[in-house]
Image (spheres, grey):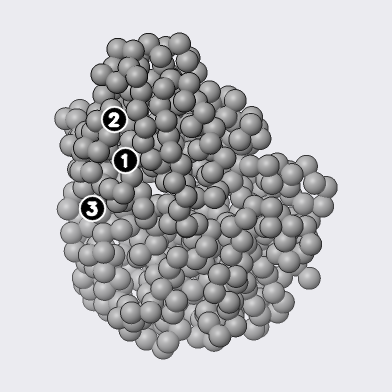
Amino acid sequence: MRKWIAGSAVVAAVALGLAGSPAWAQGSGTFKYAEQVKLITMDPQQQSGSGVPFLRPVYESLFEKGPKGEVQPLLATGYKVDGLDVMITLREGVTFSNGEPFNAEAAAANISRGVKLGIIEGLKTVESASAADEHTLKIKLKEVDPAIIDSLCYTGGMMIAPAAMADPALDRNPVGTGPYVYKKEESREGEVRVYVPNPTYWDKDKIGLARYEVWEIPDDTARLNALKTGQIDAGNWLANPQSAIIDRTPDLKLIRGTGGLNYHIIISDREGTVIPAFADINVRKAMAFAIDRTAFGKAVQFGLAVDSYQPYGEGHWAYDPALEGVYAYDVDKAREYMAKSKFPDGFSFDMPSIPLYQSRLEALAGFFKEIGITMNIVPQEPGTLARVSRTTNYPATNLVWQTNTDPKFLALRYIYENANYNPFKAKPSEELLALAKAGLESVETEVRAPVYKKMAARLADEAFLIFVASSPILIGVSEKTASNPTVVYRYGEDSINLRGLKAND
């Protein structure tokens, strides 16, 4: 594949919306955003699960997504992908907030560190990174990856200052190239994170605020009250009673963002190492048929979600309408599968939960109880579910899958023996491995789509991923935020683009 994003300063400026932009000096006013999870780390290469709004003020990625999901330049100005070789040209004249220069050497150090840590799925295909010259980054891939540039739009492409990478306290001392810097002395652990303008920012006209705050409010009702009283201007929500209230409150608005959050169960121990029943395909299919997705959507997600049977949402190029209803609720059929399994009398297992997912799991536990399966819900600290799901602490887990994510991540997260959410190292079927390989052989979606539709069908057959419900990304905002023309929601993320954001007042 060969593709260039225009490298000239003029064209890049237009792409970023810089041309003709007004000068906003040092910025003024405060904008307050609320996260529904507690901060775990400010190290983007250690980050898993939610928490990106804590990172975006400080860190910038090499690329970012435009309004329709298209790749746009940010710290990079262009790229070329030729087989296993990726060449990326970098923006000149950029420094980290600690004064260190942003160049190819710094970018290569970031990519290399991310690969070594092995947490970010988007970097799993990277063999090495190096500086071809001062402003050209070279990435060598292990295998052809048609979505490598997409991966560099998110945490995989976030750039940390080289000196900060050596700081053992990086999780609370972030240093990047972003428009804002972290104000640790004014932040309060477990309550609010404060950010102020970066005096060395390379594009000062895009600094519109004197202060940006990210509040940690995991309790849905408390977050709703904060929005109602004006303590916050915006915040993220899952499909739940509070988001439904926002949707029908006159002076508030529920923004339905791009992409979807596909809630699903992962049978991690699918070879039965700890729970032998999970190795039985009849058991897994019984669980899939036992879930009344329509009732779940109404009672637990308040009509803000749709039933889900596959990884992708309607409108995605890999979505297959033929899979709709493949596991439509049928408790009699579920009992038939249990009866012909090796565990007709049922069994019990532990499932980790965070407060945000408690009502979801209570509903699922009720469905499973109807077929003799006892699911014990084990509380976890907010923000830790993704991390514990990478361990063998639990034989199954529950997460959300971004429906606008490139399908290559199915293999990287769930299928490969070393996949992030395959902690028991279960060996994938030959068919799934073959499909994972075939999906990387072309960059054209019309060629890849049939491959990933077959993969989704095969995943349904094997039933170790049980998809339940898909909802849009939801952001609740005040009336003033809804009418603020500088508020731009990031494509596929539960965060606001801070470049150019101005306060409501």
The answer, for residue 320, to whether it is visible in the render is: no
Q: Quadrant of residue 396?
A: top left
Question: Which residue ends up furthest to the front in the rendered image?
Answer: 345
What residue type is disc 2 on? Phe
What residue type is disc 3 on? Thr
Q: Looking at the rendered structure, which numbered label has been put on residue 321?
A: none
Q: Which of 366 and 198 is in front in this view?
A: 366
* Residue at mark 3: 125
Marks 1 and 2 close (CB-CB < 8 Å): yes
> What's the CA distance linking mark 3 and mark 2?
30 Å
Which residue sits at x=54%, y=74%?
Answer: 189
Which residue sits at x=55%, y=82%?
Answer: 183
Residue 307 in the image, given as x and y percentages of width and height: 53, 28
Q: Of marks 3 and 1, which one's residue comes earlier in the chain? A: 3
Query: Closer to us: mark 3 or mark 1?
Result: 1
Q: Is residue 98 above or below residue 1?
A: below
* Residue at mark 1: 395
Residue 304 in the image, given as x and y percentages of width and height: 63, 36
Q: Nearer the viewer, residue 239 or 125?
A: 239
Which residue sits at x=63%, y=42%?
Answer: 240
Q: In which quarter of the image is residue 113?
A: bottom left
